[in-house]
Amino acid sequence: MIVCHISSCDVLGTRPTMPRKPVKRYLSLISQPVTFSQFSRSVTFLASAYMNKRQMLNHKLLKSVPRSPGNGLTGHILEESSDSSGFSEEEENEFVGVVQADFAFFDPKSEDFHGVRILLQTYLDNEKWDLSGFVDLILEQTTVGTVVKVEDDEDGAPFSIITALNLGRYKEHKCIMELREFLLKVCLEKSVKDDLMLLLRDEAQNVGLLVSQRVVNLPLQLLPPLYDALFDEVSWATEDEPTEELRKSFGFRHYLLICKVYKQKNSDGKKRQSLHADKEIIFVKPDDEVFYKLCLWSFSFPLHSKQVTSYELKDYRPMGLVMTVEADKVPIFREKLHSLIDES
C-alpha cells in the first residue's frame, strides 16, 4: 500500500492564488486512488500497490531520495508493504520502508532530458518515433510547462511533466509529423478521423497538445495546482510572450490529449453513454476521466507495448485513448478536478 503525506505552507482544501510566472509550489496532501466510479476506484486501489512497486523497480526514480530520519525532508511518505507480488526477496527488501520527500514545481530545463524521456517512453505506445526531439520541444518551452521534483533537488529526476505544445507552431518538426501520422494510423473510425484530420492539419495552429505524464504514485493532491499553473501560464503567455506570433500561438481553441485506460475486453472503442458505466472503463489518471466527461469526441486503440498489469485487471485490456476538449471547457475542468480531489 502507498501512503503519502506532505507538509505545507498551504491550507488543504483551499485553492491557492498562483503567483505570476510560478517556479515552485508546495502542498499538503494524502494520496489515494481517485475516480468518479466506485467500482473503478476499488479496482484501481487494489492494483495500485503492484503497479507502484513495478514502476519504482523499472525507473528507480526514488533511489536518490535520502531515507534516514531527521534529514529535514518531512513531506511525502511512501510506505511499501511486504506482501507477495512475484518479486525476489532482494527486490522486496530494497523497497520496503519509508521514503520521505517534499515535492516542488520547477520550470523545465535541458538537464531534465533523460528523466522526462523516461516518463514519455510509451507516450505513443511502442511506436518508433523521434521521442528525443519531442522531449527537446517540451524542455525548450520554459514559459509554459512544469516539472515536479523533490524539494531542494532541482537537478534530480522529475516525477511529473505537464505542458501544452501548439501543433501548428511545431508542425514541421519531425516528432510532430510522426505523431500526426501515428494518430491517423490508429484512428479507425471514419467520422472521428475526419475531425482528427481537421485538428491536425487545417486547425493545427489553434490546437494545444496537452502532455501530462507522471509516475504512478505521485500524490493526486498535486494535480489541481499543477493544472492551475499550466492553464494560468497559457493565459499569461497570450499577453507576455515577446512577439505577436508567439502570443497567438497560445490562444488555443482545442486541447488534444493522448492517455491510457483499461477497458473491458468485450467493449468497443467508441465514446458513448455506456462507456460511463462503472465496469466498462477504468481511467489510470483521474484528470483524464474529468477530461473525458467534457470531451468533444474521442477514440481508443489497442496498446502493444509491454504493460504493467495485475490480477485485478485480468478482464481488462490496456487501450490508448485520444480525445479533444474545447478550450472554453477548461474552467469547468479545473472546478471539477478540485472538487474530485478535495472530496477524496
Image (tube, rainbow, N blue to C red):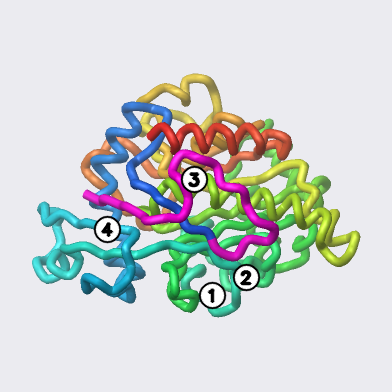
Pick the front one: 310 or 127: 310
Outermost residue on the right side: it is 244
The three-letter amino acid code for the residue at tag 2 is Leu
CB within 8 Å, label 3 to label 4: no
Residue 332, visible in the rendered structure: yes
The three-letter amino acid code for the residue at tag 1 is Phe
- From the image, state whether disc 4 or disc 1 is nearer to you: 4
Q: Of label 4 and label 1, which has the lower sequence position? A: 4
Give the secondary structure at mark 3: strand
Q: Of label 3 and label 1, which has the lower sequence position? A: 1
Pointer 1 residue = 113
Residue drawn at (50%, 56%) of the image:
213
Pointer 4 residue = 78
Main SS category, magenta section: loop
Residue 60 figure quarter: bottom left
How dense is the environment of label 4, judged by Cα within 10 Å: few (below 14), some, or many (20 and up)? many
Q: Of label 2 and label 1, which has the lower sequence position? A: 1
Pointer 2 residue = 139
Pointer 3 residue = 320
Spatial CA distance of label 3 from label 4 is 29 Å
- From the image, state whether disc 2 or disc 4 is nearer to you: 4
Q: In the rendering, at what x and y percent does residue 253 appear?
A: 77, 42
Image vertical order of residue 335 relative to residue 181, above or below: above
Spatial CA distance of label 2 from label 1 is 7 Å
Q: Of label 3 and label 4, which has the lower sequence position? A: 4
CB within 8 Å, label 2 to label 1: yes
**Magenta residue check for 154:** no
